[in-house]
Image: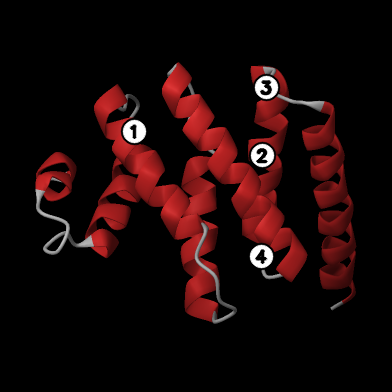
Amino acid sequence: MIIEEEKKKKKKKNEKLLIDLCECHISLSHYVSPELRSICITYLTKAASKKGESEETQKEVEMALLILSSIRDLGEEEQDMYIFGIDVIILYHQQHHNLTPLAHQSAWKILVHRFYMDYYSEEEIVNDLHFVGEAAKELKELAKV
């Protein structure tokens, strides 16, 4: 279904359906083919990059980050797309303080996993440590509530 929906002309493509299908497939499958993984990363990063402070938008971002945090064994092209997309997304949400606690946890998991993939530059490490500081502050605030 994911491949069939992706092949539809852009005007008829149901992006929300594609995102939902990708989330289900990645969360339920032990193996995701490279073709599907590439499609899913594209749509999930798009979902995670949604801007807005409504509860519905935050939940969509939260779910997309949760699923993205579980993706492993990426191909070289996918790694570049994934890492660049995630960096931009996390930086945006960090600046606007609109991640839910689960989204923070998923973003943290993504960042920790990247250390093992060895794709960090010094600037990225500094940015990510800043994110960790912000996440810690927000978690402390939530603990008070």
Compare residues 91 and 61 and report the one nearer the observer: 91
Q: Are marks 4 and 3 in contact (CB under 8 Å)?
A: no
Earlier residue among tags 3 and 1: 1
Dot 2 or dot 3, earlier in sequence? 2
Q: Residue at the spot x=66%, y=39% of the render?
A: 109
Against 32, is 131 above or below?
below
User: What amino acid is found at the position of numbered circle 4 in the picture?
Assistant: Leu
Q: Quadrant of residue 12?
A: bottom left
Q: Tell me which amino acid carries mark 2.
A: Lys
Query: Disc 4 on helix, strand or loop?
Result: loop
Residue 119 tag number: 3
Q: Is residue 20 left or right of residue 79?
A: left
Q: Position of residue 63 (x, y in %)?
A: 48, 57
At x 89%, y 64%, the residue is 140
Q: Which residue is mark 1?
A: 38
Is any atom of residue 33 visible in this view?
no
Going from N to C along the chain, the mark reached first, 1 or 2, is 1
- The residue drawn where x is 74% and y is 25% is 120
Image height of 57 relative to 63, above or below:
below
Q: Where residue 54 sits: x, y (%)? A: 54, 82
Q: Name the amino acid, label 1.
A: Ser
Mark 3 element type: loop
Mark with earlier residue (4, 3): 4
Structural crowding at the residue carrying mark 1, measured as other residues with C-alpha within 10 Å and reported as few (<14), some (14–19) or many (≥20): some
Q: Are marks 2 and 4 in contact (CB under 8 Å)?
A: no
- Residue identifier under label 2: 109
The span from disc 1 to disc 2 (Cα, nearest Å) is: 20 Å
Q: Give yes or no for contact between labels 3 and 1 (Cβ–Cβ under 8 Å).
A: no
Above or below, 98 relative to 6: below
